[in-house]
Image (cartoon, helix red, strand yellow):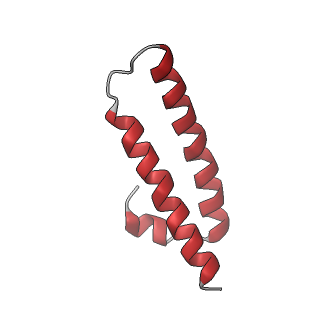
Amino acid sequence: MKNKEIKGLTEAELKEKLAVEKEALQRLKFGHAISPIENPSKINKARKLVARLNTELRAKQISK
């Protein structure tokens, strides 16, 4: 998901997307702990996406 797409989301959509992405990150980490995943950089990408979503959500909350 690109930053331009993230900025276009509403606050409610951001919260929903954030919950989904956090769950996906948790599953990736858990799966990697049990048996190494094929592409470990997916964990970094998921973590950075969660951070971008958090940042944009916080920016929208402050600007109210």
- Is 47 placed left or right of 39 in the picture? right
Question: As displayed, is residue 46 above or below residue 12?
Answer: above
Front residue (pair 53, 29): 29
Q: Residue 7 location, x and y as percent?
A: 47, 71
Residue furthest top in the image: 35
Q: Quadrant of residue 10?
A: bottom right
Query: Is residue 7 something that shows in the picture?
Result: yes
Q: Residue at x 51, y 60 (%)?
A: 53
**Spot occupied by residue 26 in the image (x, y as percentages of width and height):** 56, 34
**What is the quadrant of the N terminus in the image?**
bottom left
Residue at 48% across / 20% down in the picture?
A: 33
The residue at 39%/69% (across/down) is 4
Closer to us: 51 or 15: 51
Give above or below for 64 relative to 21. Answer: below
Q: Which residue occupies the foreground of this view, 54 or 6?
A: 54
Relative side of 44 to 8, left or right: left
Q: Residue at x 55, y 30 (%)?
A: 27
Above or below, comparing residue 53 to residue 60 in the picture: above
Q: Quadrant of the C terminus?
A: bottom right
Percent x, y of residue 57: 58, 68
Q: Residue furthest front?
A: 33
